[in-house]
């Protein structure tokens, strides 16, 4: 196998967008990876300067290939081999979602009361 040829699923795994190579291949099969607006197959050869749209569980990425990796490497090395060109509106949507989700406060009147709320309620109702 030539060193300059690299499969798309392996590349996505190497740059750590997916935890396993099979997850990367599955994403390609389900049409979650696009090249020029068309679904990209897992066996597609990755070239420098290619742009891909990749939809993962947490984010919709838009990346440009800046280097080819043939082995999975540490995160700080992996991020040097692609450029994140995700549109700003997508980044804002992710920031807004994470800010709303991780407030650390329970939404009022949704779900069960916390232990403290239950103790306060028991004290109020004089339940031993």
Image: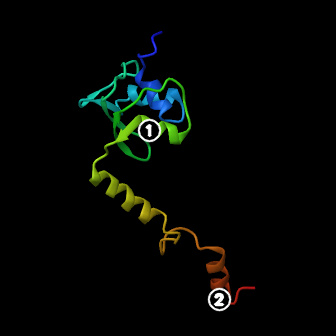
Q: Few, some or many C-alpha atoms within 10 Å of disc 1 (few <14, some 14-19, many ≥20)?
A: few
Q: In this view, does 15 lie above or below 106?
A: above
Q: Is mark 1 on a helix, strand or loop?
A: helix
In this orientation, which residue lies closer to the viewer: 96 or 13? 13
Residue positioned 65% across, 79% down in the render: 116
Residue 78 spot, x, y in % from top left: 48, 36
First in residue order: circle 2 vs circle 1: 1
Q: In this view, does 68 lie above or below 97?
A: above
Can the viewer see residue 54? yes
Residue 67 spot, x, y in % from top left: 40, 29
Q: Mark 1 points at which residue?
A: 80
Q: Few, some or many C-alpha atoms within 10 Å of disc 2 (few <14, some 14-19, many ≥20)?
A: few
Residue 114, numbered circle: none
Question: Alpha carbon of mark 2 to alpha carbon of mark 1: how far?
Answer: 61 Å
In this orientation, which residue lies closer to the viewer: 118 or 29? 29
Find the residue positioned furthest to the left.
37
Whether residue 27 sits left or right of residue 75 in the image: it is left
Residue positioned 52% across, 72% down in the render: 105
Residue 80 spot, x, y in % from top left: 44, 38
Of discs 2 and 1, which sits in the foreground? 1
Q: Name the residue under label 2.
A: 125
């Amino acid at each position: 196998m030539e060193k300059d040829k690299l499969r798309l699923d392996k590349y996505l795994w190497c740059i750590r967008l997916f935890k396993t190579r099979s997850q990367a291949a599955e994403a390609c099969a389900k049409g979650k990876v696009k090249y020029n607006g068309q679904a990209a197959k897992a066996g597609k050869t990755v070239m420098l300067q290619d742009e891909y749209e990749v939809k993962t569980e947490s984010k919709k990425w838009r990346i440009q290939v800046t280097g080819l990796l043939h082995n999975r490497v540490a995160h700080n090395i992996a991020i040097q081999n692609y450029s994140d060109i995700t549109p700003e509106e997508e980044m804002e949507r992710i920031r807004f979602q994470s800010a709303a989700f991780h407030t650390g406060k329970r939404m009022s009147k949704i779900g069960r009361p916390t232990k403290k709320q239950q103790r306060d309620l028991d004290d109020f109702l004089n339940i031993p």
